Image (cartoon, grey):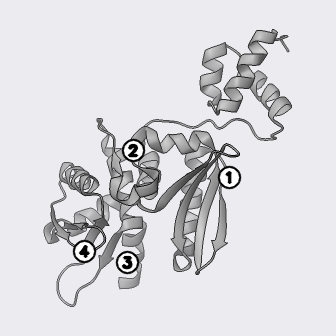
Amino acid sequence: MKRLSSEIKAKLKADFKSGKSINKVSSGTGLAKSTLYYWYKKWMGRKTPLLDFSYGPTELAGEVIGIFAGDGSQYYYKKNWQYEVHVHFGMKNLDYAHYVKMLFEKNFNKIFRLNNQPDNKLRLSTQSKIIFEYFHKFMSFNPSKKHCTVLLKEGVYPVEFAIGFIRGFHDTDGSISQPKYGKPVIMFHTTSGKLAIQIREMLTDLEIETTMFVQKSKWKPMYRVRVRAVSVYRFIEQISSFKCIKFQRKAI
């Protein structure tokens, strides 16, 4: 292995501690990934390599981001420089929690913990500055008031990303139900008015018609986006959310 100068070693240590991805460190230093793995393990004491995942707006990324937009949270503990990322579930959604665990591990190439929490709840968790910052690449939100401030950053997103995002958000902050008469009712529920508008725009681009109304309350206004009856089956087929699939299975 090529000997490294003290200056290069100092730069590598700084990059490792800052949480840079292996691709960025490699491109910045010109060193092979195998060399970076060796020094990272030697200095940082970890058996697994640096995280290495795509930042591109793929369908998988869209679904992961949509899930986080709905039921995700973040915490940064300045005292010990700890970055935490969580997704929250009710115990009745154990099957969906395992599905989300698989998606997040595939997208980030990292093992996530799924643990029981008080009040019959589940939490998917990891500690990572890179993953913490990943969501801020695509979304804007105030971590202390995420539910009403979250929205996608302006940009041109491919259709695949939009489908994934809508699927993830519908499975967390959406619903599907069967009235006594007529077609299933599909809705999205959010306290972020800007996100509600973005969801409508994405659905319109997918030729899915919607309506939107605001339900006022003492807490926060609730924005509800409803898929019009004429587009219900198109939504179920094209978006194929976890909730829609379970709904169809029960209807058989």
Tell me if residue 205 comes above or below residue 99 in the rendering: above
Helix, strand or loop under label 3: helix
Q: Amino acid at mark 4?
A: Ser
Quadrant where the image shows the C terminus: bottom left
- Of the residues tagged 4 and 1, which is closer to the observer? 4
The kind of residue tagged 2 is Met
- Circle 4 — which element? loop
The amino acid type found where label 1 is placed reads: Ile
In this rendering, the answer to whether 78 lies above or below 236 is above
Q: Residue at x 61, y 16 (%)?
A: 28
For residue 246, side relative to residue 95 (left or right): left
For residue 139, the mark is 2
Query: If you read the primary sequence from the N terminus, does the residue marked by circle 2 or circle 1 appear first?
Result: 1
Please tell me whether mark 1 sits on a helix, a strand or a loop.
Answer: loop
* Residue 119 or residue 101, whichever sits in front: 119
Residue 194 visible to an observer of this rendering: yes
- Residue 111 — which label? 1
Residue placed under numbered mark 3 in the picture? 247
Kindly check if marks 3 and 2 are in contact, taking CB atoms under 8 A apart as contact: no
The residue pinned by badge 4 equals: 217
Could you tell me residue 171's position as x and y percent? 40, 66
Q: How many C-alpha atoms fall within 10 Å of the one at disc 2: few (<14), some, or many (≥20)?
A: some
107 sits left or right of 56 in the view? right
Q: CA distance from mark 4 to mark 1?
A: 40 Å
Kind of residue indicated by mark 3: Phe
Q: Residues within 10 Å of mark 1 (few under 14, many from 20)?
A: few
Task: Classify mark 4: residues with Cα within 10 Å, few (<14), some (14-19) or many (20+).
Answer: few
Which-is-in-front pick, marks 1 and 3? 1
Q: Nearer the viewer, mark 3 or mark 4?
A: 4
* The quadrant where residue 200 appears: bottom left
Measure the alpha-carbon separation of dots 2 and 4: 26 Å
Q: What is the quadrant of the N terminus in the image?
A: top right
